[in-house]
Image (cartoon, coloured by chain):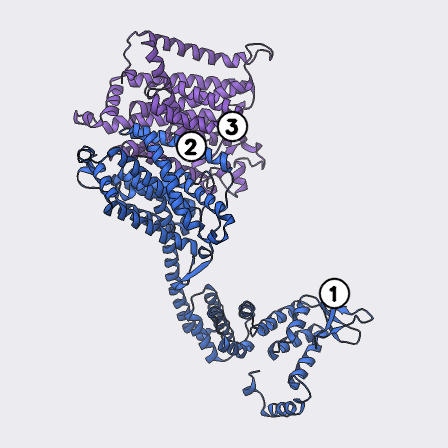
Amino acid sequence: MSATTLEPGVSRARLGLRAAMIAAVAILAAFPILNQLPQDSVFHVSDFLVSVSGKWICYAILALSLDLAWGYAGILSLGHGAFFALGGYCMGMHLMRLIGPRGVYGHPVLPDFMVFLGYQELPWYWLGFNHFAFAMLMVLLVPGFLALVLGWLCFRSRITGVYLSIITQAMTYALMLAFFRNDMGFGGNNGFTDFKELLGMPLNTGTARAALFYASLVTLVAAYLLCRWMTGTKYGRVLTAIRDAENRVRFLGYDTTSHKLFAFVVSAMLAGLAGALYVPQVGIINPGEFSPGNSIEAVIWVAVGGRGTLVGAALGAFSVNGLKTWLTSAAPDLWLFVLGALFVAVTLFLPKGLIGLMQGRGK
Amino acid sequence: MGRAPARPIRTVMKRILLLLILLAASALPAHAQDAFVSALSGLGGNFNAQAEATARLGSLGDARALPALRALSEGRLLRTADGTLLIREGSGLVDAATGAPVAAPDPEPQRISINNRVRAALRGALGQLQILSTDPAERLAAAEAVFRTRSADNIPLLETALGRETVPRIKDQLALALAASRLVSPDRAAKLAGIAALGEGSSAEARSLLLEARAANADLTEQIDGAIASIDRRLAVRRVAETAFQGLSLGSVLLLAALGLAVTFGVMGVINMAHGEFVMLGAYTTVIVQDLLRDVPALQPWSLPLAVPAAFLVTAAAGALMERGLIRHLYGRPLETLLMTFGVGMMIQQAVRLIFGAQNREVISPPWMQGTLLLPFDIPVTANRLWILCFSLVVFGLIVAAIRFTRFGLEMRAVTQRRPIAAAMGIRTGRVDALTFAFGSGIAGIAGVALSQIDNVSPNLGTGYIIDSFLVVVFGGVGSLAGTLIAAFGLGVINKMLEPWAGAVLAKVFVLVAVMIFIQRRPRGLFPQKGRAAEA
């Protein structure tokens, strides 16, 4: 697995990649500024492109988190969409609390759907979500806790490979079914929408879009640096070794369970953060985000970009979603064929993804 | 009719005399004619007279009163200026007493209106009269009507009707009505008989009747409580049996969906996420077979049995193609296989959506799969569920037999147990791989035929089953067909047991969580494989 070692070996390909990454971040960072240019300018970036690339950045964070689990710890999670959605729901709860009396029913505290369902008071698990800091803490803690419990149970019983994948898929499926229920207190199948503001900043304005865009971009860069640092330490080396031969590492005396668990929990927290950034940008969160299809789509981003390379995950998220945005408007019937074909082609012909392709050229 | 014992003997004698005198003059019993005609005329009076006349007509038991009573309840009974009653039949008029058509009189006859009291009396009287009708459906409806308007006056009528009745269902309803009527009779012995009869039954209706009677009859509390307790016992047994059947039925669906996977994943170890799509292809094959046979009326009832081999062949071919073309290149890399097959499933689904449309396709059930049957303990069972339950067991038996007793099964077991040795023995392992995968896929197709009878045939039919199927296979123990069987029925029954107090969705969530926890306690399922296969 030479592609995954992080030696600062000064190969030309690696340098080129690094330059390309910095350039890509710089171009992305320029988007909201270019958006201010007059419409007829060549460099004008449309509102649509800004908001859609803001979404892609969130997807890239999710892909990064998945790559940490799958590419470095060998945990193929088919339920990362659940962590993403849980983070999104925590942010959604905060945004719902901020609506206050501006809802359709004008209730000072209860969100519209609770008034509609006849709630008398806020359920206990909604308390505290009116504070931004508390909500942000939950964005990290809720997915992290779920990952901790699930991971602890699974890794301890040495459930690996496909079994783990199916369990994570069942987890997100069960959560989807549960969140579809009205009595859960999370808005049933309508979820949360009609958000008004965040941190005193009205949503649906150019400023808010730009601010969320930059917040996402900063988070993406920070998440990348965190993952790179993690995988570069001794801990990261052990993690990679666990991925390749778990039993040998265990026999060498390492506690593989806690190594994997740590990576899984960090990964889930990153996914939750991505979801929290995603929700105010798209303006809605509903149980559909838990659907197993979403999680497996995230896996294919990582696979397309190149598993175990971090940059590849982000690259995959951008390229697959770019393709999706273009195809779903150009030839909507074709998109699922193309996505399906991507699954087949990448696994059969491109096991190292786009990054592998580039590195193969560079050498 | 049957009131003779309560009537003074003098009246009877007088009637017999009258009868003898008038017998020659009239085709009808003259006394009845008198009573009928005089009672009928009451329908034209005020509300009190109407109610009394209605009740009398009901207890007379003369079928000729039926048209007039029906006309009254439907607002078609008219009164001429001289008091004659006419019935509007379509555009014409007939005499209410004789049924003979009459010309429209002048002045225009008036419509007779009724109030709620008369309406209630009408319901009772119509019930009493219809209870002796020749039409079984009418009799059943009448028995139900009499049950609702229960009164001690109906007892003799019901006894007569019960004596004549031959249809079991109507008989049950009549007995219930009789018991209910006895319950309100002033006679203590009749009351006790009614309580005892109700206690024999097992309906919630009987139970609520007894509860009602309990408040009114303080002296009979003990007997009534006994009867209620016996009904409760029977209801409890029925509830358990009902839940058990529903659970088995759900289990049979899970079993069908999981069996193919038990072969491809359980025996071969290939993880096929397109399994659900093979099930869906089987369901669409059923639709196609049915459409092809549309022009051959003789074969139409057989379209479903014919769809079974057709679906097997179609999906087996698809499976063989997929194994040879794609999966074989990824042996030993389960995670990649998982992703690749998911992609294939996506493409199959989209292809079906483009060819057949996204909306549901209709599958006609053959007549022998329609309707509801009653099992012992009065458990209502839909015929198609029962057939699918039997079908799943037959398919299971055939798979076990195929693996255990055929040459192909032997080679399959040899290859999965120790591939190099099997190859050294001259088994063409590649061919066996392809055949095994085709076999498993074909079973998925057969499942699709069965599921087309109870689920919507749409392109995403399969997605709903894939997670459940994997859990069933893993729960039962990978590689163990018997484990799959027990896991499917076990999960089905547990799911249905949880449903009454948790709701359908939450029950499913509970079962998913329980299986996840169980797998963590025993990663190799209920029936782990022993020996070398377990080490792989």
Res. B91 mark:
1
Task: Determine if residue A130 is in view.
Answer: no
The image shows residue A343, relative to residue B17, as above or below, that is above
Name the spot of residue A327 as percent of width and height, x first. Answer: 50, 24
Q: CA distance from mark 1 to mark 3?
A: 61 Å
Name the spot of residue B247 as percent of width and height, x first. Answer: 37, 52
- The kind of residue tagged 3 is Pro
Which is nearer the N-term, disc 1 or disc 2?
1
* Direction from residue B138 to residue A291 in the image, left or right: left
Q: Residue at x 36, y 54 (%)?
A: B390
Q: CA distance from mark 3 to mark 2?
A: 14 Å
Q: Quadrant of the C terminus of chain A?
A: top left
Discs 1, 3: same chain: no
Label 1 crowd (10 A; few <14 / some 14-19 / many >=20): few
Of the pair B247 and B54, the residue shown nearer to us = B247
Q: Quadrant of the N terminus of chain A?
A: top left
Query: For mark 3, what is the residue?
Result: A332
**Which lettered chain is shown in purple?**
A
Chain letter for mark 1, please: B
**Which lettered chain is shown in blue?**
B
- The kind of residue tagged 1 is Ser
Query: Residue A289 sits in which quadrant?
Result: top left
Chain letter for mark 2, please: B
Query: For mark 2, what is the residue?
Result: B346
